[in-house]
Amino acid sequence: MIAFLEGTLAESLPTQIVVNVHGVGYQVMIPISSFERLPPPGSAVKILTHLAVREDAHVLYGFCTAGERDLFRLLLHHVTGVGPKIALSVLSGLSVEMFKSAVVAGDTGTISKISGVGKKTAERIVLELKDKVGVAAEWEASSAKNAPSQEDVRLHDAVLALISLGYKQVEAHKAIRAVMKTGDEMPTSEELIRQALKILS
């Protein structure tokens, strides 16, 4: 098992990166949440990894935080019908803290709005993760401490609204990030969506 890669960030895209480790380029699939934390290409980088072995390929998945990797593995190993693609979508659509809060609250509506995750999958995620011994209790204890801020909620609502309008997850994240860079004050979700739509059009 490859636990992490440490080297130079050779290429960087929202869904995948290439890490140069002593002259060997490792292609790694990543969620948008990790992409947003990456340094510029050419910089030193350390990526936590999960190796998925299939009959036709060995695929590396990478994460900037242990929390992201833990959640990815939890989804893969404990939720029926959830593979790496959906697990990455979950991480791209919600922060780890917001996802945990949604599971603890049984909020299938929020989870089902994630790109690639339907209502049935969202219900299965909540049911099967809540059934895990200790998981719900542990998240209950930490949910107040790690509860998403008002800013997190506004950003998340704006991204989901753009996705529901037909924009891709990557496009929505980029547009919202661009809006955030233009002002000092935190705009409302409606204002975020309005300004993001101007950028996207």
Image (spheres, rainbow, N blue to C red):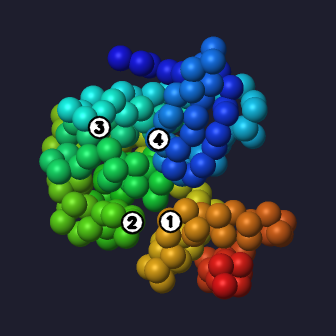
Q: Nearer the viewer, mark 3 or mark 4?
A: 4
Q: Is residue 165 above or below residue 23?
A: below
Q: Is residue 8 above or below residue 27?
A: above
List the single residue furthest toward the top.
22
Residue 137, percent from left and from top: 28, 39
Q: Which label's residue is closer to the chain start, 3 or 1?
A: 3
> How far is disc 3 from disc 1 in space, using C-alphas?
22 Å
> The disc labelled 3 sits on which kind of residue?
Leu
> The disc labelled 4 sits on which kind of residue?
Met
> How far is disc 1 from disc 2 in space, using C-alphas?
7 Å
Residue bearing the label numbered 3: 74
Q: Nearer the viewer, mark 2 or mark 4?
A: 4
Indicate the secondary structure of the residue bearing disc 2: loop
Q: Is residue 120 above or below residue 54?
A: below
Whether residues under marks 1 and 2 lie with C-beta atoms below 8 angstroms apart, the answer is yes
> How far is disc 2 from disc 4 in space, using C-alphas?
17 Å
Residue bearing the label numbered 2: 115
Residue at image location 40% in from the left, 49% down from the top: 88
Q: Which label's residue is closer to the chain start, 1 or 2?
A: 2
Of residues 180 and 136, the one drawn nearer to the viewer in this rendering: 180
Residue at image location 58% in from the left, 60% down from the top: 152
> How far is disc 3 from disc 4 in space, using C-alphas?
17 Å
Of residues 35 and 20, the one drawn nearer to the viewer in this rendering: 20
Q: Which label's residue is closer to the chain start, 2 or 4?
A: 4
Which of the 4 image quadrants contains residue 201? Answer: bottom right
Instruction: Please rate how many residues cluster around mark 4, counting C-alpha atoms within 10 Å: few if below 14, some from 14 to 19, many from 20.
Output: many
> The disc labelled 2 sits on which kind of residue?
Ser
Q: Nearer the viewer, mark 1 or mark 4?
A: 4
Residue bearing the label numbered 4: 29
